[in-house]
């Protein structure tokens, strides 16, 4: 969101630098002041990186109490569980969150790109190709998605698929 406090950027920088305690301190203050989806996303990421899964889950639960654009809650959950999720059903849970996010805000090309980036290493060739077609249909004016769509036939025929995945990532 464009109206995020500067402290959120500082928390992100601390997170990237591995200074998790400083990042967590800022996130605690931001959550106490009244979170939005980005604050919750960063805070949950920081807490999970610290191994504080329960606190990460508490932050994510706050998504239910905020106003957010359609699909934003689901995208935050998808991204979080993609990075930090565990268990046998995690992949299915992540895929369901991504599908829900693009379903609710299907004309957001950035979200389609995130979903396709998730599908590349985890999905089958058919899943990726179907995702590209759906993304292009939802966002026909997006140059990147149009480029992918125009190269679907080449992607479909490309072998070996693991090499294609590494190149596209």
Image (tube, rainbow, N blue to C red):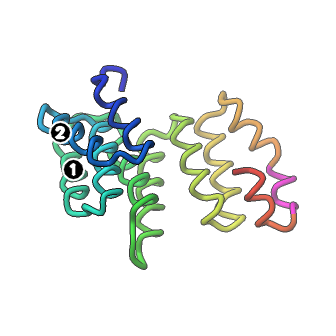
Q: Main secondary structure of the magenta part?
A: helix
Give me the residue at 50% from left, 40% from top.
Answer: 106
Secondary structure of the residue carrying tag 2 is: helix
Give me the residue at 51% from left, 41% from top.
Answer: 111
Where is residue 166? Give x, y as percent.
74, 57
Label 2 with label 1: CB-CB less than 8 Å:
yes
Where is residue 150? Give x, y as percent.
81, 41
Where is residue 151? Give x, y as percent.
82, 46
Vertical arrangement, residue 67 with respect to residue 21, above or below: above
Magenta region: 152-158
- Which residue lies most toward the top here? 3
Q: Which mark is first along the chain, 1 or 2?
A: 2
Residue occupied by mark 2:
31
Judge from the rendering whether residue 63 lies leftward or rightward of residue 107; answer left or right.
left
Judge from the rendering whether residue 98 lies leftward or rightward of residue 21; answer left or right.
right
Q: Is residue 88 located in the magenta-colored stretch of the structure? A: no
Residue occupied by mark 1:
59
Judge from the rendering whether residue 149 lies leftward or rightward of residue 38; answer left or right.
right
Report crowding for label 1: few under 14, some 14 to 19, many 20 or more residues within 10 A (C-alpha).
many
- Distance Cα–Cα, label 2 vs label 1: 8 Å
């Amino acid at each position: 969101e464009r109206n995020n406090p500067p402290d959120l950027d500082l928390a992100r920088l601390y997170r990237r630098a591995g200074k998790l305690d400083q990042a967590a301190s800022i996130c605690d203050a931001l959550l106490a002041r009244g979170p939005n989806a980005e604050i919750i996303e960063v805070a949950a990421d920081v807490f999970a990186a610290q191994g504080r899964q329960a606190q990460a889950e508490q932050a994510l639960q706050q998504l239910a109490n905020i106003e957010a654009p359609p699909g934003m809650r689901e995208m935050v959950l998808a991204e979080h569980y993609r990075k930090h999720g565990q268990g046998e059903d995690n992949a299915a849970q992540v895929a369901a969150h991504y599908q829900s996010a693009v379903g609710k805000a299907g004309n957001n090309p950035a979200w389609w790109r995130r979903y396709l980036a998730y599908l590349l290493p985890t999905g089958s060739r058919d899943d990726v190709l179907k995702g590209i077609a759906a993304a292009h249909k939802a966002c026909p004016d997006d140059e990147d998605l149009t480029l992918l769509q125009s190269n679907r036939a080449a992607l479909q025929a490309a072998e070996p698929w693991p090499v294609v995945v590494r190149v596209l990532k």
